[in-house]
Image (tube, helix red, strand yellow):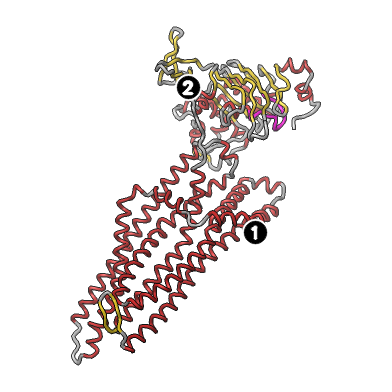
Amino acid sequence: MNKKDGLVSGDMMQKQQFDTKTLRRLLSYMKDYKGQLIFVVVCILLSAIASAASALFLQSLIDDYITPLLTSSAPVFTQLLKVLVVIGAIYLIGVLATLFYNRVMVTIAQGTLKKIRDEMFEKMQRLPIRAFDTRTHGDIMSLYTNDTDTLRQMIAQSMAQLISSVFTIVAVLVCMLYVSFYLTLVAVLVMLLILQIVRVVTEKIGGFFLMQQKTLADVNGYVEEMVNGQKVIKVFCHEETAKKELAEKNRTWATAAASANGYANSMMPMMNALGYVQYVIIAILGGYMAISGGTNIGLQGTGALTLGAIASFLTLSRNFNNPISQISNQFNSIVTALAGASRIFAFMDEQPETDEGYVTLVNVEETNGELRETEKHTGMWAWKHPHHDGTLTYTKLEGRVVFDHVDFGYTPDKTVLHDISLYAEPGQKIAFVGATGAGKTTITNLLNRFYDIDDGKIRYDGININKIRKADLRRSLGIVLQEVNLFTGTVMENLRYGNPDATDEECIAAAKLANADSFIRMLPQGYDTVLKGDGSGLSQGQRQLISIARAAVSDPPVMILDEATSSIDTRTEALVQGGMDKLMKGRTVFVIAHRLSTVQNSDVIMVLDHGHIIERGNHEKLIAEKGTYYQLYTGAFELE
């Protein structure tokens, strides 16, 4: 690990001790299982009492039953057999109690994890796009897999064993005091030494476990990236570099994991070694007291220390050390789980996307010039304004979009768009042209309110888009992106993604509109063909055609086409262009394109350069001006 990594892990170790705040929050998810948890505690208590009682019973077994039989000339084993049946019953109760609480804890663990995953996924849906721009997909996936799995191990195994160990220690301690105060004092002193060692070691491992989870997420993110980019890796012969980079990330993870688990795994052998030392000390001291005839004091009274008492106490001392060893052993799992939980809760505590909008989108019918809200799909939409006096007004959705002196930057120190003003009238086709990074896609991101502007105003049908509820705003916008995302499911299900109520006939009509129908029918099961792996069995152009058809099915009043035809060959583009022209009819459309052939018929073409609109007008006007657009069109220079 390099010096920087060392500093990071050092900081983490200072912050990440035993995180009680995270533990309390984790336990709050188990409040629905109060009844089962009470049952678990009762079973653990029975198991601990059975374990201690069976060891204590050993004294009576030796002193009161076995020893007299050894000195008797005619031994009768009836009473001994009865006692053995009793002790067998005690052991059976302990075994059954252990079985029951372990089974119930597994149920509680899975239920708790389901609740956490559901809440995490629900929260993820409310996070702004910015939250996903700043972390890798692999890191987010690691929260759902590695980090939640550590919680499963902790809740199903470690927590129950921890509680069992505490109960066992208390029960055994009482039994030890019953046998001998002096020998108990020796056992407790050794236990205090053990706890001191546990404290020193656990102070070191907390930060390493958090570092282990973070570096594991980094490895997962990198592997996912490499799997998605295999073609690119092979084309550029990047295999060796990829292997080296993964080896480095793997080494960082291995170092953190080795440090964490090395410390944690060394605790169990240390506990066992100290347990044997304690065993020997108690055997020597007990033997000396018995031989010398010294007075023994216990809760049972005073008297000589018997052979049965020594045997019972030695068994109790082992039962006393085992829970301590279990606690130290389970600390590994608990600290790992808390490190994972802290990452999960940090993700869940991200600031959700805010929405102060109150204007909603509704279906309407127009009768005698008056708009009336309706539940059925009419193809006519309106913005519904609630007023303070309880009245409602409706503004017909026409698709008039105005950017009024808009400034925006993804970070406060760098402005991406400068004083952008544009006016899109209903039914107009507005095209954005410019080099990569000029700000074309940013404009459409602002219209969707994936990000909020720094200055200026954006109005939609005369309404400030901050007043429109985000879900309704986005429902009114259909988007076809350059990067197509198809989901696991049939072609028909993918087409219906934006409009679940669409009929099969409507979906097929939309596919025909985008000229996707012919190739879809040639798939093995046609529209019922299941797409997997983001539609990996389809060509890039076919995937894009499905994306365009999907947008058509949702029937939005405003369309945004972001490099929508860049993945389609020229011949197919001519077909698609016709379909898209039908799709655009009567709609306001924003087009981002590198191919100038796709924007020639636009009502207004805007040329952007470094966040500024440097030219605007239709194709003929811009050609006549012989500026940047003219140079691009005639090939004097090309878009970068």
**Which quadrant holds residue 311?**
bottom left
Determine whether the residue tagged by mark 1 lies in a helix, strand or loop.
loop
Q: Name the amino acid, label 1.
A: Met
Crowdedness near tag 2: few (<14), some (14–19) or many (≥20) residues, C-alpha within 10 Å: many
Residue drawn at x 73%, y 27% as measured from the top left: 609
Whether 168 is drawn above or below 432: the answer is: below
Residue type, mark 2 in image: Val
Residue most extreme to the right = 636
In this rendering, position of residue 337 left or right of residue 307: right
Confirm whether residue 54 shows in the render. yes
| Residues marked 1 and 2 touching at CB (< 8 Å) | no
Q: Is residue 454 magenta?
A: no
- Left or right? Give the position of 368 relative to 95: right
**Vertical arrangement, residue 430 with respect to residue 489, above or below:** above
**Residue nearest the viewer, comparing 149 with 161:** 161
Q: Which mark is residue 1?
A: 1
- Residue at 58% x, 59% y: name it: 256
Of residues 4 and 216, the one nearer the viewer is 4
> Which residue is tagged 2?
359
Q: Which residues are magenta?
A: 431-442
Q: Is residue 359 left or right of residue 600?
A: left
Q: Which quadrant of the structure image shows residue 402?
A: top right
Q: Nearer the viewer, residue 610 or 407?
A: 407
Q: Is residue 223 left or right of residue 125?
A: right
Q: CA distance from mark 1 to mark 2?
A: 54 Å
